[in-house]
Amino acid sequence: MGAVEQLRASAVDPVAGGFYTVREAARLLGIAQPSKITGWLHGHKGRGRGPIIQRQYQPIEGAQELGFFDLLEVRFVEHFRKQGVSLQALRKAAETARGEWQQQHPFATSNTKYLTDRVEVFSKTARDLHDAALLNLVTKQYEMYVVLEEVLAKGVEFDPTSGLAREWKPRPAEFPDILLSPLVAYGQPAVMPWGVPTSAIYKTWRAENGSYAATSDWYEIDEKVAKQAVEFELGLPD
């Protein structure tokens, strides 16, 4: 599937665009309160606050599932929230970026392709909101801002045409064979090149009383990769 076709499909089809519950997304991203993600996706209409993230597809039977681009945008929002950037600023920046770039998922884009543009959007947002902290981050502390963007881009492969994320290795140094791609295992963490979900490997390992040899034989994968999958799952929060 080409980049254009993938983008079109991912906008409406969870099979092509990845599929995560809010709880799964929180677990993968290490966010202790899944309700924060729901707020970023749904907004707080009673308080006059819209969503920060424009969803890939509408909720299925009322459930707040995420797509792959949604997941990486949540990762971006959480990362900048930890730096003290307000939800108001992130909401305004996302709205501005979507309008100026004609890009539905501005926080799931390449820091190489959009870094300068994002600085301009954040600076404009800071001036509009009179947000001194955000303006300081992207102007006076520009080097720190670039480092933050580089941290976010680590482990992410971007499509060179669209600039959008194509796949993500959550912890590439520790688990180089584990990645998330919307076109593999519905976007769930999987070992490559086999495409077997890490959760399935972990369940088999438990059923086999902790035998990596039996687990790897079951899926016909390398034993060291089976160990990666198990350790990855064990490292995720409950």
Image: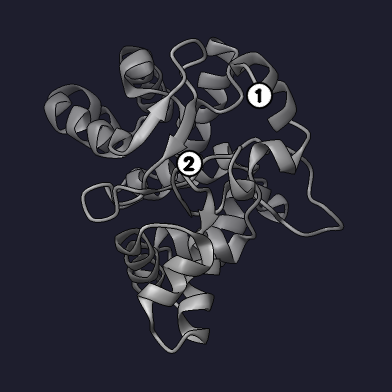
**Residue at 42% from the left image edge and 24% from the top image edge:** 158
**Image-quadrant location for residue 23:** bottom right
In the image, 21 versus 93, the foreground residue is 21
- Identify the residue at the far bottom of this view: 209
**Pointer 1: what residue?**
6
Identify the secondary structure beneath mark 2: helix
Q: CA distance from mark 1 to mark 2?
A: 16 Å
| Image coords of residue 104 (percent x, y) | 61, 24
- Relative to residue 177, is residue 120 depicted above or below? above
**Residue at 58% from the left image edge and 43% from the top image edge:** 184
Identify the secondary structure beneath mark 1: helix
In the image, 43 versus 162, the foreground residue is 162
Neighbour class for label 2 at 10 Å: few (<14), some, many (≥20)? many
90 sits to left or right of 55: left
| Image coords of residue 124 (percent x, y) | 39, 18
| Image coords of residue 49 (percent x, y) | 63, 45
**Residue at 43% from the left image edge and 66% from the top image edge:** 216
Tag 2: amino acid:
Leu
| Image coords of residue 100 (percent x, y) | 54, 11
In the image, 35 versus 234, the foreground residue is 234
127 sits to left or right of 57: left
Q: Which mark is residue 72?
A: 2
Neighbour class for label 1 at 10 Å: few (<14), some, many (≥20)? some
**Residue at 83% from the left image edge and 58% from the top image edge:** 62
Tag 1: amino acid:
Gln
